[in-house]
Image (tube, helix red, strand yellow):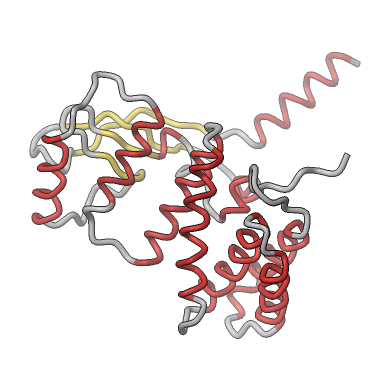
Amino acid sequence: MKILTSLCLLVSFNIQATTWADSEVDDPLSPGKKCKVSEPMSSGSYIYHWPSKYDQVFWPLTTSQGIWHCQDSGFIAFIGDFENITDAEKEAIKSFLQKRAQSAEEDSLTKLQLLESVYALRNTTAEFKNKLKRVLAYTYESKGEITTANEFRASALADINNALDTELEEFTKLEYLYLAANYERQLGNVAQSDNRLTELRAAIKNIKDEGLAGFAGYLSELLEHTSKIETGGILAPKKPK
């Protein structure tokens, strides 16, 4: 029986395992120099069912390997986001990094702060900025920095509520309604959360893009958890005992 249990646990682990490989990429700030990074080799749809789903951010962005950092220049960005940086952005980032004291081994929280600072110097879309706040929220939470995490969520929510007053692509509208329902609940705004859930159910029922049917079904399952989100603390609702 013990052997059978062990085999079952092993199979379960392998089904939900993600793998990485060491790699090198060009340093955007230092022509000719390379940065040692990790690249994903395998994953599966199970990543969309991990707790980060409540922030609608997903592996590999939610892992330390998903943040690439060049030790020599100090440049840092999400995995794969080392291109399309303008000369003006590079100069601004270089200037910032040169003025900043850098230790030989930066801890994970320092890297998160650095990531936020460097992206503040890049010209990114409002949608990207919102995702960055949500990734930071989830990652800070995973490190026990609950207050900081929820400050990022409150900021992301303000942006989301403003965006929902404008014309949005259907996918973004569905995602933002779901996030608004979660974040309002966590901030203690139950009535506003319920209103967003009502809007989300109506939007799902009336989707125009048939290609979003799968995403709509996915959100339909997730929104049933929203009412169980508690004010403060971590975002993911507690599992029933």
Residue 30, image x and y in percent?
A: 10, 37
Left or right side of 167 for 87: left
**Where does residue 176 sit, x and y in percent of width and height?**
55, 68
Res 5 → quadrant? top right
Residue at x 12%, y 35% (from the top left corner): 99
Q: Name the quadrant containing residue 72.
A: top left
In this picture, residue 206 sits left or right of residue 74: right
Q: Position of residue 158 (x, y in %)?
A: 48, 66
Of 56 and 46, the residue lying toward us: 56
Outermost residue, top direction? 2
Q: Position of residue 49 (x, y in %)?
A: 66, 49
Q: Quadrant location of the N terminus?
A: top right
Q: Going 24% across and 37% down the picture, which residue do you hit? A: 25
Nearer the observer, 229 or 81:
229
Dividing the image into 4 quarters, which one contains the C terminus? top right
Q: On screen, 47 above or below 198?
A: above
Q: Farthest right residue?
A: 1
Total numbered circles: 0
Front residue of 137/189: it is: 189
- Is residue 175 rendered to the left or right of residue 90? right
Residue ID at (13%, 41%): 29
Q: Quadrant of residue 233?
A: top right
